[in-house]
Amino acid sequence: MAEFELIAQHFSFGHKPNTVVLDKGDDCALIKPNPSSSNLLAITTDSLVAGTHFLADISPKALASRALNTNLSDLAAMGATPKWYSLALTLPKDIANNQTWLSEFSQQLAALSEEYGCYLIGGDTTSGPLAVTISIIGEVEHSQAMLRENAQVGDLVCVTGSLGDAAGGLQFVLDKDLTAVKPVYKQHLLARFNHPTPRVAFGLAVKQYVCCAIDISDGLVADLSHIVKASQVSAEIELSQLPVSDALVGQFGQTQACQYAATGGDDYELCFTVNPQHLMDINKIAEQTGIAVTVVGRITESDQSNHSVTTLLNGQVQQLTQLGYQHFA
Ligand code: ADP
Ligand code: MG
């Protein structure tokens, strides 16, 4: 049974209390702790497990970065301000006794906590194979939350930054013998995989114009599919428009770079949809924040039952071989 089917079948029980504005199915759950206030708590959890999300030889600094930044990225996709998080650590004995490892891990966590104004409130520590789970809480005003269900026909589909770099970096993690075309390419791609940059400031800045966003954790096509299903629309994206870095193209060539950009996970860029009338405002924010925004497609009407993402190459339908990552699939 695949990940999303499993959740729907086994973990969708109970009556939703009226304090729960949004639950399973989006980047964060939205909770209304105070009935008289329109401020919501945005809550999300992400786990990183050795062998699935990273290899056991990962540096403590990279593990801390990836664990916190993936969670911050979900808040960014909701337009929420980070506030508090809890940390569940499962450590094998050798790491629990390795002071250097622990201080490098915690120093990186501390630096990111400071950078994003987020405070570690508690957690749990157990013994076992290395795994890190963070649950993070942010705040967002109800009318400004960027939900997956809010895409409208005619919206432009946009992405931040460049895509596919993390998938390129992963190749160097998996294959220690992979030759770098240039050392700086390898450096750039590995840094993008090990230290993703959650687009928190960007999410906060655009939420006044943007109603619908997701962060790209499983690949653009897979994550945009969540948007079209939740919004009951379809989308088309133009592969030749996908923003790819010089390092990705230089290392892997144009065709492979494009495949990584469309389907590679772990970039933690934002994909959002916006009414074309706000494109100028978005471009202004891109300039102010120094984060590139690229229009890669548009939201289209769909048949009732078929909400899908069509990939085009120079206007012609182009099937991709691999569509993105799903656990257990
Ligand atoms: P993301 O990639 O944005 O972190 P996920 O793909 O991990 O989101 O999860 C998709 C949705 O399913 C989220 O809304 C999440 O809260 C929900 N979910 C995941 N696992 C479970 C579970 N075991 N029980 C209930 N809900 C879950
Ligand atoms: Mg997400």
Image (tube, grey):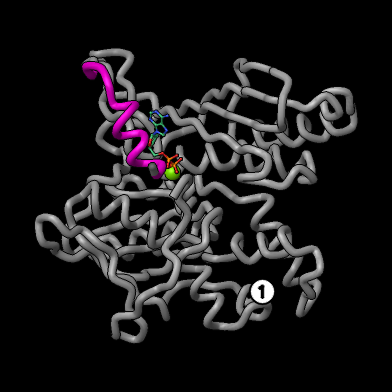
Q: Is residue 239 above or below residue 102?
A: below
Q: Position of residue 192 (x, y in %)?
A: 65, 58
Q: Is residue 262 above or below residue 145?
A: below
**Is residue 285 left or right of 15 when viewed as pictured?**
right
**Is residue 318 left or right of 263 when viewed as pictured?**
left
The reply to whether residue 51 is visible in this rendering is: yes
Q: Residue furthest left?
A: 304
Label 1 residue SS: helix
Q: To which residue does mark 1 refer?
A: 247
Instruction: Specify the quadrant that holds the N terminus.
Output: top left
What residue is drawn where x is 29% and y is 32%?
9
What residue is drawn where x is 69% and y is 25%?
90
Q: Position of residue 168 (x, y in %)?
A: 63, 66
Is the CB of the residue bearing disc 1 within 8 angstroms of ligand 2? no
Foreground pick, 295 / 47: 47
Q: Give the amino acid at mark 1.
A: Ala
Q: Position of residue 162 (x, y in %)?
A: 53, 66
Residue 117 belongs to the span the image colors magenta: no
Q: Quadrant of ligand 2?
A: top left
What residue is drawn where x is 62% and y is 23%?
88
Residue 3 belongs to the span the image colors magenta: yes
What residue is drawn where x is 30% and y is 19%?
32
Q: Position of residue 239 (x, y in %)?
A: 40, 76
Disc tally is: 1
Q: Is residue 58 above or below residue 285?
A: above
**Is residue 155 left or right of 292 when viewed as pictured?**
left
The part of the image, by quadrant, that contains residue 17 is top left
Foreground pick, 11 / 202: 11
**Residues rendered magenta in the picture:** 2-16
The part of the image, by quadrant, that contains residue 171 is bottom right
The reply to whether residue 204 is visible in this rendering is: no
